[in-house]
Image (cartoon, helix red, strand yellow):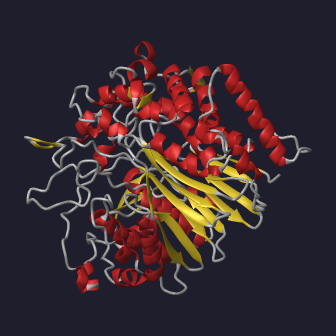
Amino acid sequence: MHQDPFLPRQLQQLMALATLILLFWISGCSVPSESVNVKASLEAPLTPWPHGAMVSAANPLAVDAGIEILELGGSAVDAAIATHLVLGLVEPQSSGLGGGAFLLHFDRTQNQTTFLDGRESAPASATPDLFMTDDGVMGYLDAWQSGKAIGTPGAVALYHAAHQRMGRLPWATLFQPALKLASEGFIVSNRLARYLPMMAKRSRLAVNAGSAEYFYPNGVALEAGARLKNPEYAATLTAIAAEGPNAFYTGDIAEAIVAAAARAPNPGGLTLTDLKNYEVKERPVICGPYHAFKICTTSPPSSGAAQIMIMGLYDRLNPDAASSETRLQSFVDAQRLAYADRDHFFGDPDEVNIPLDTLLDPEYLKFRALDRFEPSEKPTPGDLSAFDPRLAGEQWAADTTDEMAGTTHLSIIDFNGNAVAMTATVEGPFGTQRWAKGFVLNNEMTDFAKEVPADGRRLANAVAPNRRPRSSMSPTMVFKSDGELRLVTGSPGGNSIPAYVAKSLIGILDWGLTPQEAVNYPNIIARGETVRVEIGRAEGPEVANTLDAFGYTVKRRDGENSGLHVIEVTPEGLIGAADPRREGAVQALSAP
């Protein structure tokens, strides 16, 4: 619905809402009672925001959905929910209802940031040796596709928790764009189609009940350009829109999820009680300085803190007037140090004592920068007891987590200057490939360290009942010294996410790149003993040669799996970027 420029904006919004509510009444779809606060929200005074609104996400149809909601007067959270509901339909290989997400929200009027954790949680029956067999640790392919890998999905509960606090439109309204596409059909994209032959060879997507019929009708993989309907997804959305999250976490949908997890091979232990007991958690937003800016991001079990660590270490490793080659080396070494600490210390903060205050302390970052390893050395975690003797305590066993490069990210700013950075996932491609009521189920339990150390030492990211696995997802925002928003960013990409997101921060804040230039720049991932460089981008071969000359062990790759979606706030307006490595898009709306 497009606006009449001659009507006041609030009147347009109320007319649009009245029309939608009438349509719901005609069609028999009720508006949940918790959403009947829309009028009060719309009458509240709005803080002037001159920059309009913007959506950047991984598929044009999803961006269209977010824009549609913003045009109806929806908040950034409303638009994020609608956008992700479409992503779960058109990009099921990356995220969806069967997975989880982290949502970082900025309320400009209140000058407040909020982090809601909708990460999947382990079943109550989970044990540290969940993926161990008589022959050792379960092979990744077997673990990935097993029922053991399924955690309690958190996305739907996250939608509802965010909407109750930050939504403006009726709950059911947010489901309409995805519901229409699922019912009438959407065009299969090139990226989705390219996955299917590969997945038929190396996964169970083409043989599992539900996914086989949907993605391989009559035994043949869908092709790009085909029109695809998903009536099961439409029925699921209709139920959740009418009944709220209870329709997902109890009843027929929950029973289908549990049944899928219990199927052979390698059945899992997810129960109806696990689903019923799932809770979204509000966790601290953590912030750190970088020159005149403040970087704010998500705390564990996310890896957002790695952004503050990388930027702080980079700043301390760079001499004054550093050359571009030296800055590149500093970026690599900052990653190596931060990754080593992240891998060793991070886990579920409700279960593990994470020395986060120390790891983010500017004095510790100064101390840690002195550990700069030779390019040929393997980075190790910092000795916290050497920095502060009071921290001489338990040291964890070496991390064995192996995280796949799935996931999606969206960035949104609404007409009031409120913002959302949301990263969502089902972990690996199509999760476990197990199907329930129109969507695939996650394999998030493989984000735990699967191998139990032979010496009996404990792991920070070990499997445990109800625990949430460590995640590399790092939705991040940057603020100016006056508190105004400067940047919204995030990316998918498994263990490479901290490197991808840090590249966008350093590219824009230090290297003087535009958002699109920073996104396009070759990805550089410096975790462990090797440095991966994306040579398929224009500057990639030169970057690889420079790091070779410094003595690093460089692994050249033609492409990388980033999906950065960035919005920068400038005096001239909003500048968005979408990662060309995926099918992302950006749309802007002018201020009324």
Q: Is residue 131 left or right of residue 480?
A: left
Q: Quadrant of the N terminus?
A: top right
Question: In the rendered view, does 404 fall on the left or right side of 458?
Answer: right
In this view, the residue farthest toward the right is 6
Residue 67: % across, % down: 69, 43
Q: Is residue 538 left or right of residue 356?
A: right
> Residue at point 71% right, 25% down?
23
Residue at (62, 56) in percent of width and height? 419
Residue found at the far top of this picture: 218
Q: Up-down: is 206 above or below 504?
A: above
- Up/down of 196 relative to 328, above or below: above
The percent position of residue 485, horizontal first and vertical second, equals 64, 66
- Which sits in the foreground, 327 or 338? 338
Q: In the depicted view, which residue is nearer to us: 524 or 506?
A: 506
Q: Residue at x 40, y 73 (%)?
A: 334
| Quadrant of the image occupied by residue 314 | bottom left
296 or 505, nearer to the observer: 296
137 sits to left or right of 194: left
Residue 580 makes an appearance in the image: no
Q: Position of residue 378 (x, y in %)?
A: 26, 69
Q: Residue at image x 31%, y 30%?
A: 258
| Tag count | 0
Q: Is residue 437 visible?
A: yes
Q: To which quarter of the image does residue 417 belong?
A: bottom right
